[in-house]
Image (cartoon, rainbow, N blue to C red):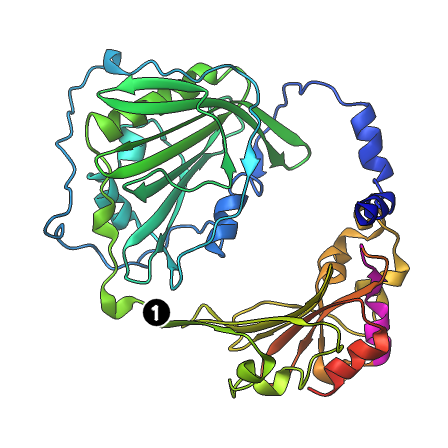
Amino acid sequence: MEYYKSYMDRQVISPAVHEKLLDLEAPKKRSGSWLKYGALAACAALIAGVGVWRMLPADIPAPGPVQPGAQAPGPIQEDLPQSALPQLDYGKAGYSDDAAYSIALPEGSFSRNLTEENLASLFGEEDPLNTKLGWEGAELSAYCIFTAEGKPWEGTVTGRRVTGGPDDFYAVLTLAPDALPLSCTVSPADGVTQCWGVEVIGRYGGIYGEGSDMEVWLPESREVEFVAHGVGCRLCIYGQEGEGERVETMISRFVRYAIAEGGVDLSCLTVDPSDIPAWREESFSTLAQARQEADFAPYLPQSAPISDYGEFYGRLSFQDGVQNMLFVRWSRGYDNVEVAVCRDGTYPCHLVDPNEPEAYDLRLYEIPWCDSVPEEYRETVDHPAFKAEDMSLAVVEARGREHDTGRMTYSFGVLHPDGTLVSYRCDGMTAEQVWELVKETL
């Protein structure tokens, strides 16, 4: 408890944020179109490790016939009248108390972009999102996460229409086999509707998008989730003020399509075994075991950084063309020493010049950094990397700041001539001790 109180006493709130909190009021209607939605699909981007991609001409080969035993979609009822749209219950308008948690991908999983041909097979016809679901004019992006066996684990399709008018919207459709797709948050079932024998859960919502000169408040947002024909669906559509009825119509059209018309078939996305990337996951209980990996050993410490850092953890994560990393960590209470060795150029880095201290020297800025660090240096100040030949004790000293425990912490990356990137996060050590840890690998 004393540690917690000490930690909270050292926290600093940005004056700018404090001023905004004092002047907080209900969102007003905003005009103008939006350019990007970094926050909307952040959860999906994080668990996939890649982000939402634009569809490419040919990323997954055209799917063949439905495999034996797989569930094929039912017939499409072209003459289904508009009046047959279900009236869905979304519960009470407002916000629910969500519980957040992390999502772990299956070992050996991998991601692929989906092509227009893949989407046509997925939905059972050429262009259902536009012609049947009301997404006319939407810019589409899609990807799928596959298990190590090449079977679909979770697919995501996003649609965005930006015209500057009231018809603009943003939609995220997530699909999973046999169960609801996982989510970064757990929300209560605000409203429940029985549609053709399927329980459909509905919720209200609202979210901010980012525009060229202002934020865009999208309060008319709805979400539904259900499982039908062996496919779990979660659809979120975000609309501007006054567009609630239109958003609900678009969602109802999808519910009818996915349940009454059997329009979604995930089995067609199965990847051929010859196209599955090789992968390997391995854990280590000692540094000696980790150093048996010859490709990584030259970049690892030869011994524990400090004798009283007793708890050790190590893990190798490899997937052909995606990642090749060996991570080790020593722990002592709330202090950790972490070294991540990334090979094969699979990890980007923000390379900086030691002669440009404003790009990395934490001593030049005050916390909170969001107020003191110029925008052009925020990425490098957060995560700088230095060429191995540029490393020095002075560079390490420039990366020091006070840790939550009251001791110092240092963080930076070192790029070696062969392209290997080594990232360091060292808590509770002096700059001299950190430099000795790095120097022996140069």
Write down the region rendered in magenta. 393-404
**In the rendered image, which quarter is residue 310 located in?**
bottom right
Residue bearing the label numbered 1: 277
Q: Which residue is drawn at 33% across and 13% down?
A: 87
Instruction: Name the residue rendered at 46%, 20% in the picture.
Output: 190
**Residue 355 in sight from this viewpoint:** no
Which quadrant is home to the N terminus?
top right
Quadrant in which residue 29 is drawn: top right
Residue 293 position within the rendered picture, expressed as x and y whole percent measured from the top left? 51, 84
Residue furthest left as drawn: 68
- Front residue of 51 and 194: 194
- Foreground residue among 36 and 203: 203
Q: Is residue 314 above or below residue 209?
A: below
Between 339 and 359, the residue placed more toward the observer is 339
Count every numbered label the image shows and give the total. 1
* Residue 75 covered by magenta stretch: no
Q: Is residue 4 left or right of residue 53?
A: right
Callout 1 environment at 10 Å: few (<14), some (14 to 19), or many (20+)? some
Residue 343, image x and y in percent?
54, 77
Q: Where is residue 192 in the image (x, y as percent from the top left)?
A: 37, 19
Q: Which residue is drawn at 22% across and 56% down?
A: 62
Task: Name the residue rendered at 80%, 29% in the picture.
Answer: 20
Placement of the C terminus among the 4 image quadrants: bottom right
Image x and y of residue 151, in percent: 27, 55
Disc 1 marks a residue whose amino acid type is Pro
Residue 332 in view: yes
Kind of element beneath mark 1: loop
